[in-house]
Image (cartoon, grey):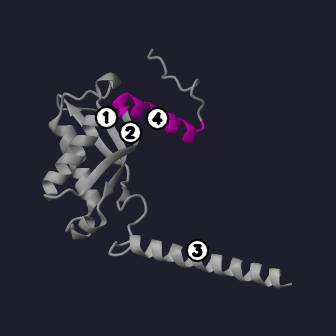
Amino acid sequence: MIKFIAAAIWICAATLGAVFYSFQAAGARGEGETPKPMLGGLDYVKTDIISVPLIHNAKIDGYFLTKLVYTVEPGEMKKLSIPADALITDQVYSFLYSNPQIDFTKKATIDLDAFRAAIRDTINARVGTNLVHEVLIDQLNFLSKDEIRNNWLRRRQDAAGIAPETAKPAAAH
């Protein structure tokens, strides 16, 4: 019986010592540190779909559609006097219109890394601080004028109940 009581006291003492040590070690590491938000202290902010008409030779060639995610410092974000979405949208427009050599019809000529870096760098330069750390692409599309017209005709025919194979223009007599 005495062995049983001694073993129980030993187990309780060892458990209390381990708990006390773990709280001491955790407290010493966390002194003076503010708890950071999830994912390294940065906020991830999604934009709505940004639609930019691409104009070449005074004609619209198509539409550049993108949805971006950007990582920002929460403290710097609160200091902005304009909405960050407006700033991002403006920089996407500015980048695409200041780089007319980008041809979205040829996918091989598009450098996504340069696009992301340019958006990030121009926003940070405009704000005057390191606000945006990373620009991620959630969605990226280019619709030519012909694709938009075909989609519009298809929706119009579907709404009217006309089968696409029977919707041929009548021959002129």
Q: Nearer the viewer, mark 3 or mark 1?
A: 3
Q: CA distance from mark 2 to mark 3?
A: 54 Å
- Mark 3, Cα crowd under 10 Å, few <14 / some 14-19 / many 20+, is few
Amino acid at circle 4: Asn
Q: Which residues are magenta?
A: 143-161
Percent of width and height locating residue 78: 26, 70
* SS label for mark 2: strand
Mark 3 sits on what residue?
Answer: 18
- Which of the two residues, 106 or 148, is positioned nearer the viewer here? 106
The quadrant where residue 94 appears: top left
Quadrant containing the N terminus is bottom right
Residue at the right extreme, as displayed:
1
Q: Residue at x 52, y 75 (%)?
A: 21
Give the residue pinned by disc 4: 151
The label number, if any, that marks residue 140 in the structure image: 2
Characterize the magenta stretch by its predominant secondary structure.
helix
Query: Is the Cβ of the residue at disc 2 closer than 8 Å to that at disc 1?
Result: yes
- Residue that carries the numbered disc 1 in the rendered image: 112
At 23% from the left edge and 56% from the top edge, which residue is drawn?
A: 87
Q: Residue at x 56, y 38 (%)?
A: 158
Q: Is residue 28 magenta?
A: no
Label located before the other in sequence (4 or 3): 3
Q: Residue at 34%, 25% (x, y): give it.
A: 107
Residue 154 shown in magenta: yes
Question: What is the C-alpha distance between the residues marked 2 and 4?
Answer: 18 Å
Please, what is the three-letter code of the amino acid marked with disc 1?
Answer: Leu
